[in-house]
Amino acid sequence: MSSEVFFIKDVKEEKLEALLEHAGVGDLTGVVALKMHMGERNNRTFVKPAFIKPIVEAVKKHGGRPFITDTTTIYKEKRYTAMDYYETAFAHGFLPSSLGCPVLIADGLKDDGVPVSEHVEIAKSIYESDSMLVISHATGHCASSFGGALKNVAMGCVTKKTKKYQHEVTRPVLNRDLCTDCDKCREVCKHHAISEAHLINLDECVGCGACIAVCESHALSTPPDMSPNLQKRLAEVASIVLHALPYTNLLYINFLIDITPFCDCAEFAPEYLCPDIGVLASRDIVAVDMATIEMIKTEKFDGDPTIQVREAHRLGLGELDYEIVEI
Ligand code: SF4
Ligand code: SF4
């Protein structure tokens, strides 16, 4: 079986509307979560409010009541709390007055989630919506090779507890023999997860990798098989989230523009993986991510970006085969 993936080359307002109509935006009823990533402060490649406004209007045209949403981060930067995130979102132009709908941080002021399994809590406002449009910026990723719709759901629709569960597999490995006790890792660790003896407290570590980046002697490194393991956790959590949501009206739209090697959590993009391609939309999260990877070209990514997609297919989230329908 194959799934339809709708495609536009030109990212223009009328084209975006036509794309959404073909993909079934009319089925997004009631309160509609527009789940996106509004960019870490100083990131410049997140999906811009100018592209979100026609999406908001398309949802409203069919009677849906949209709100733009995301969750707070596990790492301590400018989206760590809801208040931090509102300031960053507004600085990036996500203003309710210009977009015509509310902006709501889905895990609220207190990292509020609905537990749906041992490790997974869905951010409350996403769980309590009536339908969801997952808006993803397709990028490479330093830990998961690729970030698209699956990652947006797995890492983006959940509380800090569930983000931490996924990041367990990115926690650094220490080779004590190479350590020079320079203390640089302790200086950058905002989670106080490194002891004076430079041992890592795994309960406190959130796997952000900041210490690895500053360890000049390579005493700290990423764990073996980090990317496959993280991709499998992404698929596992996405599956739990999508099966536990009390609604099935879901649509996925991937922007294949400003395609950077790192995700929008990175402050700046040093280069692009490839020129802009367009926008894809589908009801099938597996098909839309597979089409995204193959349009960018699998070999452009660091490692195998399809592990998460194949695992999501195995878990019943969608089809690996797709048919591109150009609008
Ligand atoms: S940065 Fe590396 S070398 Fe320096 S104390 Fe930490 S682990 Fe040891
Ligand atoms: S120990 Fe390293 S990876 Fe863990 S939280 Fe601290 S800086 Fe991040």
Image (spheres, rainbow, N blue to C red):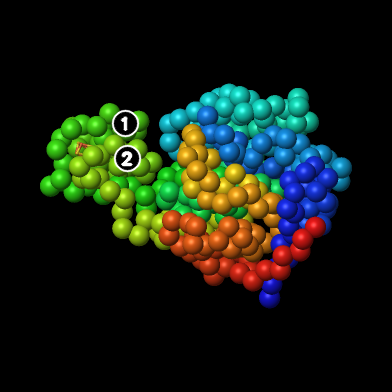
**Quadrant in which residue 88 is drawn:** top right
Residue type indicated by callout 2? Ala
Crowdedness of circle 1 by 10 Å Cα count: few (<14), some, many (20+)?
some
Give the residue displayed 32% in from the left and 33% down from the top.
189
Give the residue displayed 78% in from the left and 47% down from the top.
16
Which residue matches tag 1? 188
Where is residue 192 shown, x and y percent of the image? Answer: 30, 32
Residue type indicated by callout 1? Val
- Whether residue 11 can be seen here: yes
Q: Secondary structure at mark 1?
A: helix
Label 1 residue near ligand 2, CB within 8 Å:
yes
- Chain-order first, disc 1 or disc 2: 1
Where is residue 215 shown, x and y percent of the image? Answer: 25, 39
Question: How many numbered circles does the render carry?
Answer: 2
Where is residue 144 shown, x and y percent of the image? Answer: 45, 53
Give the residue displayed 50% in from the left and 43% down from the top.
271
* 150 or 6, nearer to the observer: 6
In the displayed structure, 22 sits above or below 111; it is: below
Which residue matches tag 2? 213
Dividing the image into four quarters, tell me where ligand 1 lies. Answer: top left
Disc 1 to disc 2: CB gap under 8 Å: yes
Give the residue displayed 55% in from the left and 61% down from the top.
297
Left/right placement of residue 29 relative to residue 70 reads: right
